[in-house]
Image (cartoon, rainbow, N blue to C red):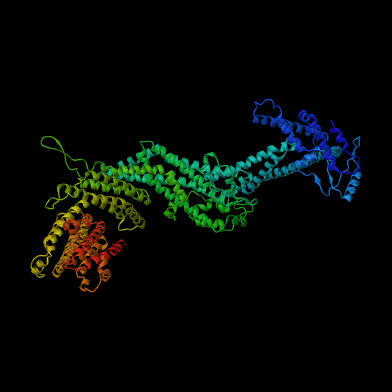
């Protein structure tokens, strides 16, 4: 092909200027296109390759493709077009392959037009023209020739085009240069590698020299420390501390010496190991002496030794584990089936030896058991306290002691160490809350709870184990109080540990200030505070904290709990402490649950035989149901004795417990009372208000039975009210004790739910039905005032000075005396007061509501009603007085009924309607400003205004077509409730006013009465109801 010739022709001699590069590229493209056209037989057949216009050639070519094979008319035009397009695509693929081949052989002839055709411009204005030398040997171009060519092209300023051939030549040149540079780099790299190898050899020799030097230094240091170990006196605590530091250094050096060890180290190791073993044995002996309390030990110095040895966490946890084992051994001695059985057997034998009768045997047995349990619990608590005190001293030293060199606090060192699996707490404490004493106490309570659970599973001794709770609780509280006294004594010291150790107690962190002897009493009677002051504040020699043969060798820590008989810590502080909460919820929880369960069983035992179902047999031998049998006085006394016996368990002298148990036992009493009330409900007849009274108002047999049940409940309530004082205060009179009085007060407060439960049962099932029945009789008697009692003609004939009895004297006084004689006086005082108060409040509301409905209400009628109101008040006072209550009418239901009774007297003499010129609005405002309006119910005011209304304005009960007594019953319920009736009264009043407006629109002559009443009622009603709601 001619493409090679064209590409060769495009090469130029270096330095030769290009005449027209655009024409050269165009001619090359034209030659390529002509070659393509000549190879296509179709183009040649139709002579389309002769044209010089490319567009005409393309159109002609497409038309020829469409027109070929015209002989087949059966083909459709669409199919022919598809075939023509496929042929065009094949030709395009041929053109593309040809273009790729041409671009490889002669790229400068094809790439330029094609790039411009696709929108890319390869022309660069102001660029330099590269001269490419066509040398046959392919040597590198001379840079000087390139520079000269660039300068010439720059001076000429002609626009040039960078060809692909020049770019390819440059790439070849750069490739050859890179090969040269790569060879140079390889030579340099080999030189550097040889130097690096020489340097590594020298460095390795130097490192061996340095390692040998370091080993020699460590051997010299090791020999020095080993020689120092030979001169220490391990019996001297100061020398022991220094020896521990040297041992730690030696062991660290032995670990760092490389293997194999030098011969001198091999010979030295047995001596070092032997000395290290002796140091550890001496430290272990000191720690053992501290744990067992066989001698005076400086705990801070001992821990300092273990710190130097790197075994401080292990030593601390070992001390904690020893404390737990001591407490566990003490607990096993006390909390074992054999010990508890032996305690009961010894107590029984001692009681039998001093008792002659069975009753005396029981009393003596309870007394001996109480004493033995107290002694055993106190001994157990003392052992637990001793172990806890040792762990607390350890915790205090760990928190205050630090290493004088590294300044690390020992507690932080122990916290960073690993806790043994047998001491791991349930929740991992934070670093700031870490405490070995808390972990010890949690584990102690957990072990105690598990131990008591196992004992309680033994049914033979479970009751005896539960009976230990009062004594154990008292002993634990005393133990915690004394422990808190010790903690407070240690926390109130004004001198810090570092100050005391750095002033006169040595320079290596000696712990004279933390000597156990500070927390013990001396044998010569020196107090703990005096011993502490002398040991911390007194001047001592440098060897005081290291020698045990000084003047404080007689001190012991065994006498603290034995000699301290009391505690300065309040019970509230103990109860709020985490130690008590953990002990109560974990350690004593199973024992407390068992104790309360047995306490409830003893309290409820007498109830099981109370209120048995009554059965009787008739003459035919048929069983018939009768009223249940009620408990006797002896049964109630037995119940009282049971309650007081259980409460006395909280008395330290009587029951061996603690006064803080009163609330706990009182809750058990409350549960017993609830069960008693549940059985009481089954013993009631449930007569209701219809079965309480006979037709003559006398109590029925069923009500008499319920009344007896009420007396029993009242007796029980009285027992509950007096039991605290009879248990905690009366046995100690004439002496008084604030603790016992406070316990009695707390017990009374805890008994309140039981007393309220009793009152609820009595009031709901006995007194409420009786009150409703009696109120029905009273309401029937009061409604007789509507039988013409206060008619104007009757009032005018009798007069106020008439010898005729008033309505109250005829209808109510006798009724109240009958109620007081047959009902109220037969009830207990508290029940009688409740019934009398219910009757009084209902009577007042009913009497006032009935009196306000009287219509018409003349002057004489008002006088008689006022007189009857005074007698009515006196009759109610007598009723309450006979009921045995100290209340007055003004105290019943916060004085509301009595205030309305007094206000009604003023209401009946209201004269606002005497001024006919005043409007309804003015009268309403004037009425709202009256003093008595706030104490009178709205319905009473409405009904009173109806007495001044025209005849067309019907009264509410007439409008509803009801009798007055039935209407009043809707306002005042039989139980004395008046809240529901006010809204209905207002609705009826509005209906009456609406009906009046309709009647008045038809009949203008409304008869006698004030026409303003309807308007006054409509204005007054909403305001009165609003005031009553607020």
Is 45 or 125 nearer to us in this picture? 45
Is 603 or 644 nearer to us in this picture? 603
Whole-percent x and y of residue 213?
78, 42
The picture quadrant where one finds residue 1003 is: bottom left
Can you say whether 661 is above or below 352 in the image?
below
Tell me if residue 192 can be seen: no
Whole-percent x and y of residue 1022?
29, 63
- Indicate left or right for 416 with 722 as reference: right
- Indicate left or right for 717 with 425 as reference: left
Total labels drawn: 0
Tell me if residue 750 can be seen: yes
Residue at image x 36%, y 43%?
595
- Image quarter where the C terminus lies is bottom left
Can you say whether 921 is above or below 547 in the image?
below
Whole-percent x and y of residue 937?
25, 63
Is 613 or 111 nearer to us in this picture? 111
Whole-percent x and y of residue 540?
59, 56
- Indicate left or right for 361 with 412 as reference: left
The picture quadrant where one finds residue 825 is: bottom left
- Image quarter where the N terminus lies is top right
């Amino acid at each position: 092909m001619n493409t090679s010739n064209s590409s060769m022709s495009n090469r130029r001699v270096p330095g030769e200027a290009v005449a027209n590069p655009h024409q050269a590229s165009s001619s090359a493209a034209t030659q390529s296109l002509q070659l393509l056209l000549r190879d296509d037989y179709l183009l040649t057949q139709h002579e389309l390759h002769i044209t010089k216009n490319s567009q005409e050639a393309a159109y002609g070519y497409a038309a020829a493709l469409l027109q070929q094979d015209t002989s087949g008319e059966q083909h459709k035009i669409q199919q022919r077009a598809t075939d023509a397009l496929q042929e065009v695509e094949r030709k395009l693929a041929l053109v593309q392959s040809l273009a790729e081949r041409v671009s490889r052989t002669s790229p400068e002839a094809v790439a330029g037009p094609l790039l411009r055709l696709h929108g890319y411009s390869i022309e660069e204005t102001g660029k330099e023209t590269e001269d490419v030398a066509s040398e046959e040997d392919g040597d590198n171009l001379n840079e000087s020739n390139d520079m000269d060519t660039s300068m010439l092209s720059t001076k000429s300023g002609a626009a040039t085009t960078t060809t692909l051939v020049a770019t390819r030549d440059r790439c070849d040149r750069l490739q050859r240069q890179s090969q040269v540079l790569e060879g140079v780099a390889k030579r340099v790299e080999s030189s550097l590698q040889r130097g690096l190898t020489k340097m590594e050899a020298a460095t390795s020799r130097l490192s061996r020299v340095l390692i040998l030097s370091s080993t020699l230094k460590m051997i010299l240091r090791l020999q020095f420390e080993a020689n120092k170990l030979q001169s220490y006196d391990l019996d001297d605590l100061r020398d022991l501390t220094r020896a521990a530091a040297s041992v730690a250094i030696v062991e660290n050096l032995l670990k760092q010496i490389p293997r194999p060890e030098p011969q001198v180290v091999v010979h030295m190791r047995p001596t070092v190991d032997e000395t290290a073993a002796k140091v550890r044995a001496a430290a272990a002996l000191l720690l053992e002496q501290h744990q067992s309390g066989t001698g005076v030990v400086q705990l801070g110095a001992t821990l300092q030794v273990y710190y130097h040895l790197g075994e401080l966490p292990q030593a601390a946890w070992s001390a904690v584990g020893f404390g737990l084992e001591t407490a566990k051994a003490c607990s096993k001695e006390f909390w074992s089936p054999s010990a508890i059985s032996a305690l009961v057997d010894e107590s029984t034998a001692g009681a039998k030896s001093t008792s002659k009768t069975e009753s005396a045997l029981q009393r003596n047995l309870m007394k001996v058991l109480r004493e033995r349990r107290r002694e055993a619990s106190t001994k157990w608590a003392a052992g637990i306290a001793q172990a806890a005190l040792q762990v607390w001293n350890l915790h205090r030293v760990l928190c205050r002691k630090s290493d004088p060199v590294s300044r690390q606090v020992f507690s932080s060192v122990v916290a960073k160490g690993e806790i043994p699996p047998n001491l791991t707490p349930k929740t991992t404490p934070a670093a700031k809350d870490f405490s070995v004493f808390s972990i010890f106490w949690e584990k102690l309570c957990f072990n105690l709870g598990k131990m008591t659970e196992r004992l309680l599973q033994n049914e033979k001794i479970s009751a005896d184990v539960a009976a230990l709770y009062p004594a154990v609780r008292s002993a634990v509280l005393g133990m915690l109080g004394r422990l808190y006294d010790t903690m407070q004594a240690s926390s109130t010291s004004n001198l810090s540990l570092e100050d005391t150790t750095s002033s006169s107690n040595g320079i290596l962190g000696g712990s004279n200030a933390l000597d156990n002897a500070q927390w013990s009493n001396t044998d010569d009677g020196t107090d703990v505070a005096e011993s502490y002051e002398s040991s911390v504040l007194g001047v001592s020699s440098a060897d005081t904290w290291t020698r045990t043969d000084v003047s404080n060798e007689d001190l012991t820590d065994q006498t603290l709990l034995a000699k301290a008989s009391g505690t300065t810590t309040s019970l509230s502080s103990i109860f709020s402490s985490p130690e008590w909460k953990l002990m109560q919820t974990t350690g004593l929880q199973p024992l407390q649950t068992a104790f309360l369960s047995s306490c409830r069983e003893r309290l409820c035992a007498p109830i099981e035989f109370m209120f048995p179902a009554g059965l009787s047999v008739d003459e035919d031998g048929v069983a018939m149901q009768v009223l249940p049998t009620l408990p006797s006085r002896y049964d109630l006394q037995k119940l009282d004795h049971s309650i007081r016996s259980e409460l006395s368990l909280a008395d330290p002298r009587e029951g061996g417990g603690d006064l803080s148990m009163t609330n706990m036992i009182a809750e058990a009493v409350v549960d017993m009372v609830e069960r008693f009330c549940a059985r009481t409900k089954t013993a009631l007849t449930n007569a209701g208000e219809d079965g309480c009274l006979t037709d003559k108002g006398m109590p029925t047999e069923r009500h008499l039975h319920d009344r007896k049940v009420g007396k029993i409940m009242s007796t029980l309530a009285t027992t509950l009210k007096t039991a605290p004082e009879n248990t905690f205060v009366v046995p100690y009179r004439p002496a008084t004790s604030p603790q016992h009085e406070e316990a009695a007060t707390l017990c009374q407060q805890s008994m309140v739910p039981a007393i309220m439960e009793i009152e609820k049962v009595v009031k709901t099932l006995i007194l409420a039905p009786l009150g409703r029945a009696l109120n029905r009789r009273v309401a029937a008697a009061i409604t007789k005032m509507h039988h013409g009692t206060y008619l104007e003609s009757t009032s005018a004939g009798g007069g106020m000075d008439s010898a005729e009895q008033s309505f109250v004297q005829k209808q109510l006084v006798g009724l109240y005396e009958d109620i007081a004689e047959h009902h109220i006086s037969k009830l207990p005082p508290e029940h009688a007061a409740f019934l009398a108060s219910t009757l009084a409040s209902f009577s007042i509301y009913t009497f006032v509501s009935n009196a306000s409905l009287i219509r018409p209400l003349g002057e004489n009628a008002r006088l008689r009603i006022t007189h009857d109101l005074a007698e009515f008040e006196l009759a109610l006072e007598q009723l309450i007085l006979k009921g045995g209550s100290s209340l007055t009418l003004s105290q019943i239901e916060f004085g509301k009924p009595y205030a309305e009774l007094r206000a009604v007297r003023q209401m009946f003499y209201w004269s606002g309607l005497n001024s006919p010129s005043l409007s309804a609005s003015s009268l309403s405002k004037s009425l709202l400003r009256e003093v008595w309006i706030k104490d009178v119910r709205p319905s009473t005011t409405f009904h009173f205004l109806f007495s001044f209304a025209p005849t067309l304005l019907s009264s509410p009960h007439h409008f509803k077509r009801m009798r007055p007594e039935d209407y009043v019953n809707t306002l005042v319920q039989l139980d004395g409730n008046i809240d529901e009736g006010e809204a209905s009264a207002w609705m009826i009043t509005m209906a009456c006013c609406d009906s009046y407006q309709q009647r008045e629109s038809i009949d203008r002559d409304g008869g006698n009465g004030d026409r303003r009443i309807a308007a006054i009622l409509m204005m007054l009603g909403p305001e009165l109801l609003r005031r009553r709601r607020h």
